[in-house]
Image (cartoon, grey):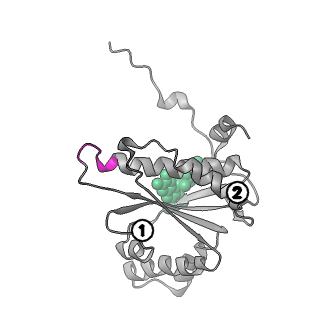
Amino acid sequence: MQAIDALVTRRSATTLTEPAPDAGALELIFASAVRAPDHGRLRPWRFLVVRGEARARFGELLAGHLARTQPAATPESLQRERDKAFRAPLIIVVAAHVNEAIKKIPPIEQSLSAGVAAGNIMLAALALGYNAMWKTGGAAYDPQVRQSLGLGPSDAIVGFLYVGTEDGEASTLPRPSWREHTRVWDGR
Ligand SMILES: Cc1cc2nc3c(=O)[nH]c(=O)nc-3n(C[C@H](O)[C@H](O)[C@H](O)COP(=O)(O)O)c2cc1C
């Protein structure tokens, strides 16, 4: 697939299944991620690869977050959280390592770079014949989840990217016209 085809057809997967990107595809996916624009060459990206049995432990983190924040959560809703970890064969956690001491490069620029890296991962996956979904939810902002993933207080999770092979119908979400979001500014 040409890069432009991936860019103009990107959509989230509705359902994902095996196979996950193989080692060669992952190499290209992460090589794309680290091409994200990066003010000051801070390399503010952190990527965690979660697959196989580790997904069960990841699901426990999601369920643990729900149990802590909603003590009345039912066993069914806790199980739904655990099951989320199995909606794709591979999860890539993308975090921004934000160094607030660098005044020249504000935190938002560091987070944006990680966001672009996440976008590149999604586009690379699509270009290679896979697809992905970008999720966050409260667990992404939970310090205990962050710590359990081995991330520090300066790391902000920007996404849980679920990656695999698209299964079933492609998304039919209506797409906006770029014209509605764009205007020419000529200074007058
Ligand atoms: C930072 C970020 C976090 C998101 N978190 C969620 C989420 O937790 N749950 C969800 O259903 N969609 C989430 N989305 C939106 C979906 O990933 C998706 O982009 C949206 O449903 C539109 O579908 P599309 O990707 O096919 O255009 C998130 C998107 C971004 C950029």
Q: Do we see residue 105 in this rendering?
A: yes
Q: Is residue 126 left or right of residue 152?
A: right
* Span colored in magenta: 103-108
Image coordinates for residue 170, horizontal then vertical, percent: 72, 52
Relative height, residue 153 to residue 171 (above, below): below
Q: Secondary structure at mark 2?
A: helix
Q: Nearer the viewer, residue 14 or 30?
A: 30
Quadrant of the snapshot with the C terminus: top left
The verdict on label 1 being within 8 Å of ligand 1 is no
Image coordinates for residue 17, horizontal then vertical, percent: 72, 66
Mark 1 is surrounded, within 10 Å at the Cα level, by few (under 14), some (14 to 19) or many (20 or more) other residues, namely few
The numbered mark at residue 33 is: none
Instruction: Decide which of tag 2 and tag 1 comes sooner along the chain.
Output: 2
Q: Which residue is mark 1?
A: 138
Q: Quadrant of residue 79?
A: bottom right
Give the prevailing secondary structure in the magenta stretch. Answer: loop
Mark 2 is surrounded, within 10 Å at the Cα level, by few (under 14), some (14 to 19) or many (20 or more) other residues, namely few
| Residue 106 among magenta residues | yes
Residue shown at the point (69%, 46%) measured from the top left = 127
Q: Which residue is mark 2?
A: 24
Distance between mark 2 and mark 1 Cα atoms: 33 Å
